[in-house]
């Protein structure tokens, strides 16, 4: 198969990019792949909302920029922060034009919320299901575009580069070129190659490398792992954001239900098991301090008391007020026997967001020619060492837009790098020689459990050198065993995701070992302070 533009991922970044391209170049083909059903994305689960300076009387670009820089703890790229904050408002207006609805107050103005680290009310939301509403609007808009083909249940295995034509490619190769991807088409159970002039990775986050995460099962870091295998540049992987308040449900594994930070924005109070409001002991901003601080404070309270959760107190809210803004949370809590007007909500931190990823420039270009990245899989420089709440939906839209502009320019200017030997027929078919059906799935599922456990216990909110060294040794073994299995087994999404998550875990640990300081989301008790050398670590 051949396409002009190939998009991998159907979350906010992939869908926005596809819509933009299709509008700019209705004569060209845009093919969008997604590994399960098209709305199963991190985007769909976003609750709190999207940050943007919509109320010029009480907010300003300068304040949003400042809040983002403070949260990022010295590692944000200031130019990128300015781009995202300034251009973000236009992108928000665009998605409103495409049909997304955000809540308004009684006077018809947008009802803006507040979350940790924000100095103003600037979060647009659709009750507590903002991402679902944005995903709906984008998917509906996509369906009206005849030049966009969406193929769901199509698992991308690897990027095709000159490596597949028999050339040696290393990290030092100056002109690595992406010609498309190999996919496992789950609709046909066949491995196919899709060649494209330009490819965008919008594969989302990697929360699934941890035992407890707010991310759905698709969040396995596939894009990052593919770029790393293709020798592209990855950075800042140590900065994994743990959301302070995932609902604690004993026995629930996989995706944890989120209690949005907007609940604290509206007055929710964290309490320990003795009932004491503890955040004032950690930060003057109390429950609305940036996420890294709140998550560490909760982690400490849990460790001191030897418990697996703390509580979020919403008993002082009126039922009407709570259900108007948070109907989904109200219903979820009620379904497990918690009436938020009478009961405390048990909460604990959970892996939530990857601040690092595939290194991109201000146009979303990666270090590999013809390959762009946007959304959570990309590292644009916006978040630095810690993402400000509700900045990621904004970032995804801004960079999907920028990448679309640059892609069209590249396409129209005929500057798409064409490697001498590349014509469709020269790219070999996937080589499955010597592989057989898996004998038993336990080899995959047990390794997955081990990986999640070691990442949670050794590479969580609080780290130290010994834990990181142990994690690396165990990952080495898991890597060897999984590579051996991969060489002899017919590929499946389960095996490929395990392989990708082991790569991502390795990158997180490697970056954490490089950083000899505590900064933002990376807290290492062997280096309790910050170093004077402020730099991003590039792999
Ligand atoms: P996603 O939306 O995750 O989409 C990834 C896509 O890539 C999927 O379609 C998937 O199928 C596809 N894919 C992945 N691997 C492959 C493969 N190998 N082959 C084919 N397809 C593949 N951010 C905010 O700004 N505000 C919020 O209020 C907010 N709340 C959140 C609440 C929750 C519970 C979570 C989990 C996150 C929240 N975030 C929030 C973060 C934000 O939702 C995500 O960062 C953002 O939606 C990511 O969008 P994306 O387009 O990059 O990726
Ligand atoms: C939340 O609603 O608390 C999540 C917001 C975010 O991750 O940006």
Image: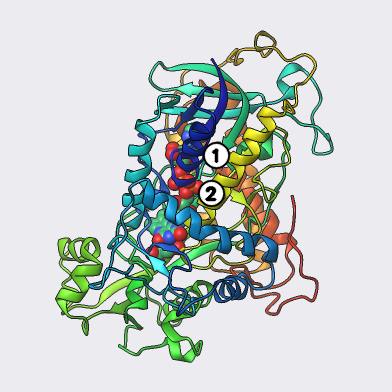
Query: Residue 189 occupies which quadrant of the picture?
Result: top left
Q: Where 223 falls versus 78 (above or below)? A: above
Q: Where 177 falls versus 378 (above or below)? A: above
The x and y percentages for residue 96 are 37, 52
Q: Which residue is mark 2?
A: 375
Give the mark nearest the N terminus, 1 or 2. 1
**Which of 235 and 438 lies nearest the eye of the viewer?**
235
How many neighbours does mark 2 have within 10 angstroms: few (below 14), some (14-19), or many (20 or more)? many
Question: Mark 1: is the Cβ under 8 angstroms from ligand 1?
Answer: yes
Query: Residue 342 occupies which quadrant of the picture?
Result: bottom left
Q: Secondary structure at mark 1?
A: helix
Q: Which residue is mark 1?
A: 222
Q: Residue shown at 80%/16% (left/top)?
A: 420
The x and y percentages for residue 421 are 77, 13
The x and y percentages for residue 108 are 27, 68
**Residue 387 visible in the shown view:** yes
Quadrant placement of the N terminus? top right
Q: Secondary structure at mark 2?
A: helix
Q: Residue shown at 66%/60% (left/top)?
A: 80
């Amino acid at each position: 198969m051949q396409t002009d533009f190939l998009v991998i991922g159907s979350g906010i970044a992939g869908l926005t990019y596809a819509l933009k391209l299709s509008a700019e170049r209705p004569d060209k083909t845009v093919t969008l792949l997604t590994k399960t059903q098209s709305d199963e994305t991190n985007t769909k689960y976003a609750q709190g909302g999207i940050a943007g300076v919509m109320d010029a009387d009480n907010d300003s670009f300068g304040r949003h920029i400042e809040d983002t820089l403070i949260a990022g703890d010295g590692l944000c790229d200031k130019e990128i922060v300015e781009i995202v904050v300034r251009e973000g408002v236009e992108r928000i207006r665009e998605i409103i034009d495409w049909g997304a609805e955000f809540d308004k107050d009684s006077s018809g103005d947008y009802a803006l919320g507040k979350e940790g680290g924000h100095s103003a009310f600037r979060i647009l939301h659709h009750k507590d299901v903002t991402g679902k509403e944005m995903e709906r609007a984008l998917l509906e808009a996509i369906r009206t575009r005849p030049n966009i083909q969406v193929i769901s249940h199509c698992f991308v295995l690897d990027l095709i580069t000159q490596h597949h034509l028999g050339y040696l490619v290393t990290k030092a190769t100056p002109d690595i070129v992406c010609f498309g991807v190999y996919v496992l088409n789950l609709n046909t159970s066949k491995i196919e190659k899709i060649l494209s002039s330009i490819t965008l990775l919008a594969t989302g986050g990697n929360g699934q490398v941890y035992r407890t995460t707010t991310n759905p099962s698709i969040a396995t870091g596939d894009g990052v792992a593919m770029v790393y295998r293709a020798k592209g540049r990855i950075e800042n992987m140590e900065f994994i954001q743990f959301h302070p308040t995932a609902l604690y449900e004993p026995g629930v594994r996989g995706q944890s239900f989120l209690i949005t930070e907007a609940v604290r924005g509206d007055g929710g109070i964290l309490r320990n098991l003795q009932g004491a409001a503890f955040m004032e002991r950690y930060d003057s901003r109390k429950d609305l301090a940036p996420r890294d601080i709140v998550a560490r404070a909760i982690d400490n309270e849990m460790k001191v008391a030897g418990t697996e959760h703390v509580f979020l107190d919403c008993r002082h809210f009126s039922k009407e007020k709570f259900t108007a803004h948070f109907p989904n949370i109200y219903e979820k809590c009620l379904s497990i026997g918690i009436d938020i007007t009478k009961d405390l909500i048990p909460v604990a931190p959970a892996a939530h967001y990857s601040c690092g990823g595939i290194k991109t420039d201000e146009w979303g270009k990666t270090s590999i020619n013809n390959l762009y990245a946007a959304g959570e899989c990309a590292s644009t420089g916006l978040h630095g060492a810690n993402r400000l709440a509700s900045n990621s939906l904004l970032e995804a839209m801004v960079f999907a837009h920028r990448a679309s502009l640059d892609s069209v320019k590249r396409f129209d200017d005929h500057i798409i790098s064409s490697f001498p030997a590349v014509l469709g027929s020269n790219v070999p078919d996937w080589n499955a020689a010597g592989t057989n059906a898996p004998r038993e799935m336990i080899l995959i599922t047990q390794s997955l459990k081990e990986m999640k456990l070691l990442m949670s216990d050794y590479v969580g909110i609080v780290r130290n050198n010994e834990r990181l060294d142990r994690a690396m040794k165990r990952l080495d073994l898991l890597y060897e065993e999984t590579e051996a299995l991969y060489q002899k087994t017919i590929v499946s999404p389960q095996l490929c995701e395990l392989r990708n998550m082991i790569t991502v875990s390795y990158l997180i640990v490697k970056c954490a070992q490089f950083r000899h300081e505590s900064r933002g989301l990376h807290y290492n008790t062997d280096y309790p302070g910050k170093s004077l050398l402020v730099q991003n670590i590039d792999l």
